[in-house]
Amino acid sequence: MDEINADFFTGNRRRLRELFTGTAPILLSANGLLQRIADTNFPFNQDPNFWYLTGVDVPDALLFMYKDKECLIMPDTTDYGDIFNGEVKAESLMAISGIESVMENKEGWKLIEGTLKRIRHLATLAPPASYIPTYNMYANPARASLIRKLRDKSPDLDILDLSEHFKTMRFVKQPSEIAAIKKSVDITCRAINSARRHHYEYEYEAEADISRSFRRDGAAGHAYDPIVASGINACVLHYQENSSKIEEGALILADVGASYNHYGADITRTWSQNKATPRQQAVISAVNDAVEFSLEPLKPGVIYADVISDLRSFVGEKLRELGLIKTISEEEVFRYYPHSPHFLGLATHDVGDYHAPLVPGVVLTVEPGIYIKEEGIGVRIEEDVLITDNGYELLSAKLPRIF
Ligand code: GLY
Ligand code: MN
Ligand code: MN
């Protein structure tokens, strides 16, 4: 019952049509494959919205929905692709997606072009900027390239953006999505619980054990690059080298999440392989108090943005108690706690409305941290939480918070 199958994807397409009350056709692009070097690519990551409607993991595929018709349009195949990456069979795509028509690229574009002649509006997903300065990253070019092609063929076409509809749909998780998240959380809890019992000399040893545990438990891999940081490395929030020697007495921070059926966990624990110093213990205990403080109010009706804002003030008080700041201001707190909790799902930082009342089925993280570079101490504790009818379920409850 709680499986992700063709009924799930068919239901999502139906809900999108219901939410988008317009009569315009809907045309969505999969992500494209990104070159790593020469003829090798980075691991393929499907556009979560495209996957949410189709279950299809093929790069550059298109989904076209018009009136009561829907079809998948495949990218042009090449001998090279078929030989090196394997052939994609139309029957298997039909079985996954519940879509009855799978077309070759040429045939599909003929259909789209025929439709473009008769319509003024078309709905799709707005492309991100090609370069995202905040993250210093290039965005996947697939959506922009689809829009260029459409403009080329139909310069006056009015293009509508479906982003808000996807945000609404993906905000509340369905039972099959919750089951997948629970599975990835359980796998992650097991891996961290096992890692923290070992004594490691290098960060990569812990990373290797965690990765092995994920795969052995059936996860596809990591939902994001794992962070295993010791000592001052933990003050780099998205530290990914995981290669340093673990100095005697240093804390280890592991922020990892398994990916199962496209849904990820995002859990952090910080521990000492020896006995933590009183100062380390004080910081860990302050962060633990902050977790409890922000879990407490979680229930339907509560505004997540308020919980986050209260959490920041609470961490501010803890920073003052630890003698790190004198006055609690946003800037002062940001110096020692420069990140925030977020929704969790198909994306680690999932879509959702931070100012809307929480409802049952929303999955989110609670993740305070305190990073004191001058002392070489970085502590984060991160829990994954499901909002229920009456309150919340702590999905990562199987993993003790303090070891
Ligand atoms: N691991 C990324 C985050 O905690 O948001
Ligand atoms: Mn997180
Ligand atoms: Mn995390």
Image (spheres, rainbow, N blue to C red):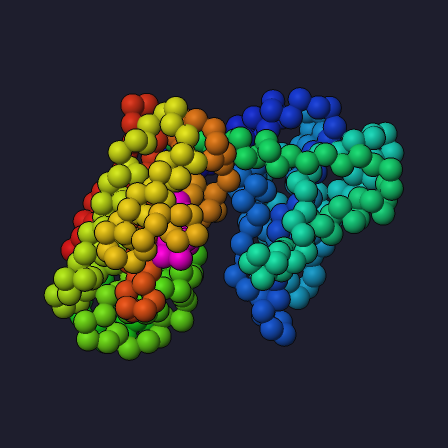
Q: In this picture, which residue range is highlighted in magenta?
A: 334-341
Examine the image and state in which quarter residue 243 appears.
Answer: bottom left
Q: Tell me which residue sits at (66%, 66%) in the image.
A: 80
Q: Give the left or right position of residue 200, taking residue 232 as reference.
A: left
Q: Position of residue 99 (x, y in %)?
A: 60, 35
Q: Position of residue 326 (x, y in %)?
A: 31, 53
- Toward the left, the furthest residue is 275
Magenta stretch: includes residue 272: no
Which quadrant is the C terminus positioned in?
A: bottom left
Q: Position of residue 240 (x, y in %)?
A: 41, 67
- Name the chief secondary structure element in magenta: loop
Comparing 318 with 206, the one in front is 318
Q: Tell me which residue sits at (55%, 58%) in the image.
A: 135
Examine the image and state in which quarter residue 278 appears.
Answer: bottom left
Above or below for 35 versus 243: above
Residue 196 visible at all: no
Which quadrant is the N terminus positioned in?
A: top left
